[in-house]
Amino acid sequence: MFAKNWFYSITLISIMGLAPASRAGDAGQKPRSDDAASRPVVTTTVGYSVPDVQLVRDDGKQVSLPAEMNDGRAVVLNFIFTTCSSFCPLSSQTFREFQQELGPDRERVHLMSISIDPEQDTPARLRDYAHKFAAGPGWQHYTGTLAASLAAQRAFGAYRGDKMSHTPLTLMRAAGAKTWRRIDGFATPSELLSECRQLLAVQ
């Protein structure tokens, strides 16, 4: 199912005018032989406890993370930062296309992107980033204190020590569910749609 992911990653990177991640990583990051873009996508089912932290949404409003994730919609989550030049643009482009492919189901899904560089990613910067990727009303971006961001990253197994070591990760959960689908690697929008439709079918 995921055999086409590497081709898809290269295609999107080419469209966006970026160098493949195996040749150019985040600013200051040396290319690695085990580059995440070349790894197969792995999907697992995991139980996570949502931390009781406050974040700041891209509209400037302070919000509770549990409340944002329990508003009656399925949740699709990733972690990004706005100055990232490799994984994050590709992940955000995937979210953009995924949101478009959802069609009428868009209203039943809450896309959430949490910054792993909250000290730099102000709400205004996140709004600009969201606009760049044509984020619709069901896709919000979040910042906040460094402590809150780290708590969220650790709770979802996304913390890698620093922003330069992050890896592509998408998590999704049906509304009110106790378990999450964890997708490590670059899934295509169609693959995310397939996973999400399975969750929506049980809501």
Image: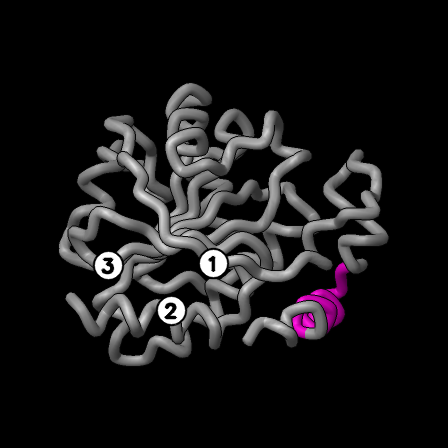
Residue at x 66%, y 35% (from the top left corner): 165
Q: Quadrant of residue 27?
A: top right
Residue drawn at point x = 76 percent, y = 54 percent:
21
Residue bearing the label numbered 2: 195
Q: Amino acid at mark 3?
A: Ala
Distance between mark 3 and mark 2 Cα atoms: 10 Å
**Mark before the other along the chain sequence, 1 or 3:** 1
Q: Secondary structure at mark 2?
A: helix
Question: Where's residue 185, x and y in %?
Answer: 58, 56
> Does 16 lie within the magenta span?
yes
- Kindly check if marks 1 and 2 are in contact, taking CB atoms under 8 A apart as contact: yes
Name the image colouring.
Answer: one colour
Q: Are marks 1 and 3 in contact (CB under 8 Å)?
A: no
Q: Which is more foreground, mark 1 or mark 3? A: 1
Which residue is located at x 34 percent, y 68 percent?
196
Residue 187: x and y, percent? 54, 65
Toward the top, the furthest residue is: 147
The residue range painted magenta reads: 8-18
The alpha-carbon separation of the residues under discs 1 and 2 comes to 10 Å
Q: Earlier in the sequence, mark 1 or mark 2?
A: 1
Closer to the N terminus: mark 3 or mark 2? 3
Q: What secondary structure is found at the residue carrying circle 1?
A: strand
Q: Quadrant of the C terminus?
A: bottom left
Q: Tell me if residue 77 is in the magenta stretch.
A: no
Q: Badge 1 is on which residue? A: 43
Q: Label 2 is placed on what type of residue? A: Glu
**Residue picked out by circle 3:** 174
